[in-house]
Image: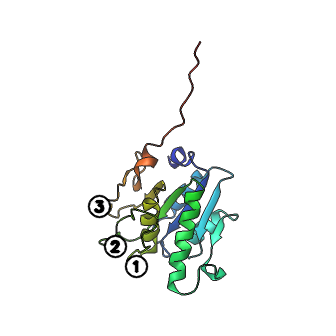
Amino acid sequence: MLSTTFNYYTCFGFSGSRKWGQSPAPLSSAAAAVPPGSRVLVGCAAGVDAFFRLAFPTAEVFSVASGQWGRGRGAFAARSVACVRAVVNGGGLWVSFPSSPCPVGLVPAVSQSRCFSGSGSGSWASLAFALGCSLPCVVFLGSLPVPVAWGLSPVPGLPGWFGCPQVLAPSQSPVQLPLF
């Protein structure tokens, strides 16, 4: 269940395709797994963003229309970078729902200073940037191919879901054992 993974976090960033043509079940499952009172961050696009804005009316919306990230196509990239960084700063989990295969040649950034580029796919660009920032991530791929060299592995018991190593084996706080 997603809730087992999601319970480690209180901050969530959601992103995905503007045209989600698959069943809404994975989106609904993710929304239901978010612990009450959690901070939710999402973009301003149609599709997946709109689903999570409706699911979480108090979500922090990163809107290009605000003008905060400039104008034109670059504003969408700047908005996405700001959203990912806010989730990083919140110690959160990035949850992604791409609807097409990863663009050929796109790999996660190795540092936060690397250029944000998704070769035409903002969903994959955001996920690559999040992984490059060492942000814990899960992604619903359904039947899409898993990109090579991304470090994503199947989430046990959840067909179509993949996660990065820190999600699949989260570190736990040490427990002090009694001396007597």
User: In the drawing, does residue 118 fall left or right of residue 65?
Assistant: left
Rendered residue at 53%/79% (across/down): 76
What element does badge 3 sit on? loop
Most foreground residue, 114 or 91: 114
Most foreground residue, 26 or 134: 134
Name the quarter where the C terminus is drawn.
Answer: top right
Q: Is residue 127 visible?
A: yes
Q: CA distance from mark 2 to mark 3?
A: 11 Å
**For marks 1 and 3 on the same chain, the one whose residue lies earlier in the sequence:** 1
Residue 103, label in figure: 2
Q: Which residue is mark 3?
A: 148
Image coordinates of residue 106 in percent, x first then y, are 34, 70
Q: Is residue 48 visible?
A: no
Q: CA distance from mark 1 to mark 3?
A: 18 Å
Residue 146, label in figure: none
Rendered residue at 63%/68% (across/down): 53
Image coordinates of residue 58 in percent, x first then y, are 70, 63
Q: Residues within 10 Å of mark 1 (few under 14, many from 20)?
A: few
